[in-house]
Image (tube, rainbow, N blue to C red):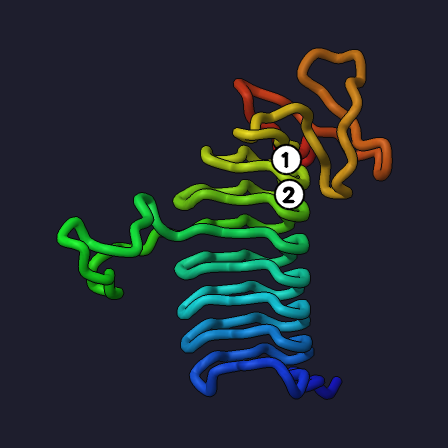
Amino acid sequence: MPTTPATVAPTADVDARATLGAGTRVWHLAQVREDAVVGRDCIVGRGAYIGPGTVVGDRCKIQNHALVYEPAVLEDGVFVGPAVVFTNDHYPRAVTPEGALKSADDWHAVGVTVRTGASVGARAVCVAPVTVGRWALVAAGSVVIADVPDFALVAGVPARRIRWVGHAGEPLEATGTEGVWRCPATGAEYVETDGTLRPRDEG
């Protein structure tokens, strides 16, 4: 089967040193910086920013005006909602203690990691360095300052786990058996152990 090359809107700014996978679409006014790697079949929305050296997996959606600052890592199938921000500085300052304008050599960037299948809702902020676990869901407007477990639904400022979700993204329902949850969309079951969740068929 022939592959479809990446498509870049005329007003987008994709650095010549960036890599775009087959089938990826970069929309108007988006910017993909030098040495960024964007996988296959991704969507980079209008006005989105992907920083230098950022790694984006296959089949990701980065929606309009999302800011993905380096050195973020997004695994396959990640959804980043409109106007989401991934920070990259523990202690941001424009100037040094002496009052000089900071340069790239004056700070060490730290990144956000988003694992396979996870979603970050509109206008959420993830404060690096945090990891959003597999298939987790960050509610719109949340501020994430701690790692998010796999399959967790987190919300609030700061974000806290309020439910579990399955692969379909819908909140899981109790089955009546302690520690066992079921997805209302797919019927798949999940097992909770010591504050973590895994699909029952993972053993």
Q: Residue furthest left?
A: 98
Mark linked to residue 151 = 1
Task: Check disc 1 and give the amino acid type.
Answer: Phe
Residue 80: where, in percent of width, then height?
63, 54
Q: Which residue sits at x=62%, y=31%?
A: 154
The structure residue drawn at horizontal position 47% and vertical position 83%, both measured from the top left corner, is 15
Quadrant the C terminus occupies: top right
Left or right for 90, reference 69: left
Disc count in the image?
Answer: 2
Q: Please determine whether, in this image, residue 197 is positioned above or below residue 102.
A: above
Please determine whether, in this image, residue 121 is positioned above or below residue 182.
below
Q: Label 2 is placed on what type of residue?
A: Trp
Residue 60 in view, yes or no: no
Crowding around mark 1 (Cα neighbors within 10 Å: few <14, some 14 to 19, many 20+) is many
Residue at (53%, 81%) from the top-left corner? 14
Q: Residues within 10 Å of mark 2 (few under 14, many from 20)?
A: many
Residue appearing at x 30%, y 44% in the figure: 91
Mark 2 — residue? 135
Observer able to see residue 190: yes
Verify CB contact (< 8 Å) between mark 2 and mark 1.
Answer: yes
Task: Determine the CA span between mark 2 and mark 1.
Answer: 5 Å
Give the image quarter of residue 28. bottom right
User: What secondary structure is marked by label 1?
Assistant: loop
Q: Position of residue 158 (x, y in %)?
A: 53, 29
Rendered location of residue 140, percent (x, y): 67, 41
- Secondary structure of the residue carrying numbered label 2: loop
